[in-house]
Image: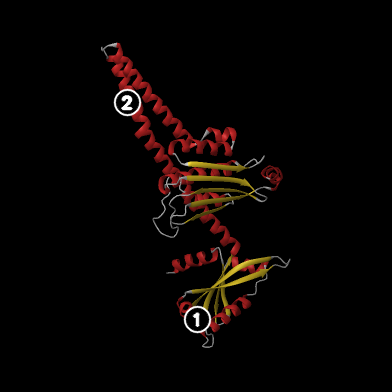
């Protein structure tokens, strides 16, 4: 028991939040962070005790007329926003959390948590979640590539290999050999086309060599020929040089938006608009297909990297992402990225 008390005391002393324990108006204990706050920010424990006492009295008062009292009564602790000011006038935002330990003796614990630390913790949590999203998306993309390699390209090469073996072993007349050679050549041409298509899906060379607009136009031209859907591309970027990450995300969102429309929406026309505005660059991908209800689970099913995962990638680059859709009214995917000031003038002159 004594050893347990020892470890509890160490835990209390090393806690990352400032912790105070009061009994009947008297400060019983404070940990290292609490002592630091008292020293550096001149925190008055009596003021903290009075804040909590007032809050407790208010919750217990029959005149409070609080519509949430039933909920509050069930809460193990309560939170009070608090601003502490240093001797130099610097303001620090804290959240004061108190918990009643013994109502009869009015024993309660107070924790002061820095909102800056909370914000940092939230950012780290979001970063971890985003990392999981991206890792999962990458893994799904690898699975798709592996499946395409196995189901299509490997099978095509295997078929060509069999044809070559038949030619090698053939004792038939030259006409049959010629026919077999033509079949092998056709099979290899088809496989080569599939390899090129797969390479374009993974990372089009034109994106690196000629830029985002050229890559989007090449993508839409290829898909227009394959699908029969009409594509329109309106792009006004001027001399704008985009960050590589932003450029990649804009291309992927265009690709994914079009892919999902072709798979699920049965559109007749798809329009891509990429414009440099005064303060930001915007991308809109609009189709006139079936549309879907955003709030209905299961209505929308993104594949590959997934538009919902793309939402997190956009936010990670300080952009905004929005999907608007309705049954029978098509779908529009909209992305905004802020423009660095040094890029705006040339881009706007060209756009206008």
Say left or right for 107 vs 170: right
* Residue at which label 2 appears: 159
- Kind of element beneath mark 1: loop
Q: Residues within 10 Å of mark 2 (few under 14, many from 20)?
A: some
Q: Which residue is mark 1?
A: 67
Residue 342 as seen in the image, left or right of residue 320: right
Q: How dense is the environment of label 1, judged by Cα within 10 Å: few (below 14), some, or many (20 and up)?
A: few
Q: Is residue 304 left or right of residue 127?
A: left
Residue under the image location 51 percent in, 44 percent down = 254
Question: Cβ–Cβ below 8 Å for labels 1 and 2?
Answer: no
Front-lying residue, 236 or 136: 236
User: Measured along the vertical axis of the image, is residue 165 above or below residue 51?
Assistant: above
Please state which of the two labelled residues, at mark 1 or mark 2, is closer to the viewer. 2
Asked if residue 200 is positioned above or below residue 85 in the image, the reply reads: above
* SS assignment at label 2: helix
User: Residue 315 at what x, y percent from top left?
Assistant: 55, 52
Q: In the rendering, at what x and y percent does residue 191 appear?
A: 39, 28
In the orientation shown, which residue stands out farthest toward the right? 88
């Amino acid at each position: 028991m004594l050893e347990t008390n020892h470890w509890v005391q160490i835990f209390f002393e090393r806690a990352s939040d400032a912790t105070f324990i009061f009994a009947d108006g008297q400060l019983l204990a404070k940990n290292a962070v609490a002592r630091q706050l008292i020293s550096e920010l001149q925190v008055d424990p009596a003021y903290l005790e009075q804040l909590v006492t007032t809050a407790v009295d208010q919750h217990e008062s029959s005149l409070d007329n609080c519509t949430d009292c039933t909920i509050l009564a069930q809460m193990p602790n309560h939170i009070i926003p608090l601003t502490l000011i240093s001797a130099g006038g610097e303001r620090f935002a804290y959240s004061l959390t108190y918990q009643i330990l013994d109502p009869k003796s009015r024993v309660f614990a107070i924790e002061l948590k820095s909102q800056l630390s909370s914000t940092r913790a939230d950012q780290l949590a979001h970063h971890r979640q985003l990392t999981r999203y991206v890792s999962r998306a990458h893994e799904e993309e690898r699975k798709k590539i592996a499946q395409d390699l196995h189901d299509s390209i490997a099978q095509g090469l295997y078929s060509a290999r069999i044809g070559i073996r038949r030619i090698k072993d053939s004792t038939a007349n030259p006409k049959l050999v010629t026919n077999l050679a033509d079949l092998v050549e056709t099979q290899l041409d088809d496989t080569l086309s599939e390899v090129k298509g797969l390479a374009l899906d993974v990372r089009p060379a034109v994106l690196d060599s000629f830029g985002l607009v050229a890559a989007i136009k090449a993508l839409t031209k290829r898909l227009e020929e394959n699908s029969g859907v009409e594509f329109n591309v309106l792009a006004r970027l001027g001399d704008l040089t985009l960050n590589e990450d932003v450029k990649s995300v804009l291309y992927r969102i265009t690709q994914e938006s079009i892919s999902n429309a072709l798979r699920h929406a049965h559109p007749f026309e798809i329009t891509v608009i990429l414009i440099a505005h005064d303060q930001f660059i915007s991308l809109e991908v609009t189709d006139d297909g079936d549309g879907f209800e955003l709030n209905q689970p299961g209505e929308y099913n993104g594949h590959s990297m997934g538009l919902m995962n793309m939402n997190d990638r956009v936010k990670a680059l300080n952009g905004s992402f929005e999907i608007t859709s309705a049954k029978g009214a098509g779908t529009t995917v909209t992305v905004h990225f802020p423009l660095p000031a040094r890029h705006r003038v040339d881009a706007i002159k060209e756009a206008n």
